[in-house]
Amino acid sequence: MFLLLGCAAGNLSWPEGSAPVMAAWALERPGSERDELYLLISNSELSTCAFDLSDFENIASGEHEETSQELALMLYREGSRIAFLHLYRFRQDSWEGTYPLSTEPVNTVLDDREPFAAEAAWWAMLEARVASDNGLIRSYEPVEYDVEVDVPQGDVQIDRESERFHGRFGLESLDVSGTFKASRCDVDYDESIFPVIEAGLGTTVVEPDETE
């Protein structure tokens, strides 16, 4: 237990339990005046932030190639929890600060007086069963899961920015919170895990009868 906690990049807490953060990645997307920061925080391991949307398509079709196995485990193993945070800053040079969650269009809430805003989603795989296991690659079939997008209440705090982003978040309407130390993802957005996770948290989430 002490070794596990020593390797953790933070902690996740929800009404039914808690778990150490085993993967925390951050990716910046600079703009002319408005910059974006994506944060992926999970209790599953993810050794790289470089992925392709085809990795998610492989999982949806049941073809769990080696490159997508970690992603399959993160999304579909029973007990998986993922916080997906999308931060915005307006005319600011540092990410340090407090980002209130907003369900309004970002252009309507960002200005010089309120330069920070955030969006949040939460993924919880409540029950899953093993669909196949050949000794090397295991695939899971979702049985019961909960996906919350556009969480309306809470905030994200960036306490320190260096090689990693240190911070915490609270999704008040879900009674979910966490701390994180997120490593920088130094690839382009389209080559990263983030559009894959956005697909997984959106309308393309695989229903149980589509995993066969």
Image (cartoon, rainbow, N blue to C red):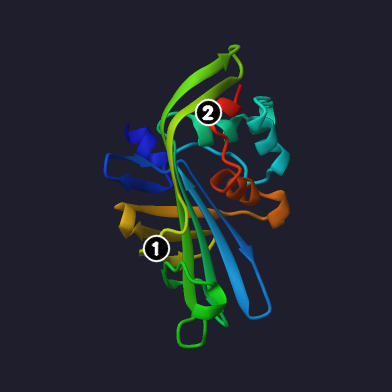
Tell me the residue at 61%/51% (across/down): 194
Q: Position of residue 138 (x, y in %)?
A: 57, 20
Asked if the residue at tag 2 contacts the one at tag 1, i.e. Cβ–Cβ closer than 8 Å, the answer is: no
Tally the numbered discs: 2
Q: Is residue 190 above or below residue 70?
A: below
Quarter of the image holding residue 152? bottom left
Disc 2 marks a residue whose amino acid type is Pro
Task: Report helix, strand or loop for mark 2.
Answer: helix
Tell me the residue at 35%/64% (across/down): 154
Viewer-side residue, 99 vs 21: 99
The answer to whether one can see residue 52 in this image is no
Q: Which residue is mark 1?
A: 152
Q: Position of residue 137 (x, y in %)?
A: 61, 19
Viewer-side residue, 208 vs 37: 208
Please identify, in this view, whether the residue under mark 1 or under mark 2 is nearer the observer. 2
Disc 1 marks a residue whose amino acid type is Pro
Q: Judge the density around disc 2: few (<14), some (14-19), many (≥20) Cα neighbours within 10 Å.
A: some
Tell me the residue at 33%/52% (across/down): 174
Q: Position of residue 21 (x, y in %)?
A: 42, 44
Q: Which residue is mark 2?
A: 208
Q: How far is disc 1 from disc 2 in space, using C-alphas?
A: 27 Å
Q: Judge the density around disc 1: few (<14), some (14-19), many (≥20) Cα neighbours within 10 Å.
A: some
Viewer-side residue, 159 vs 191: 191
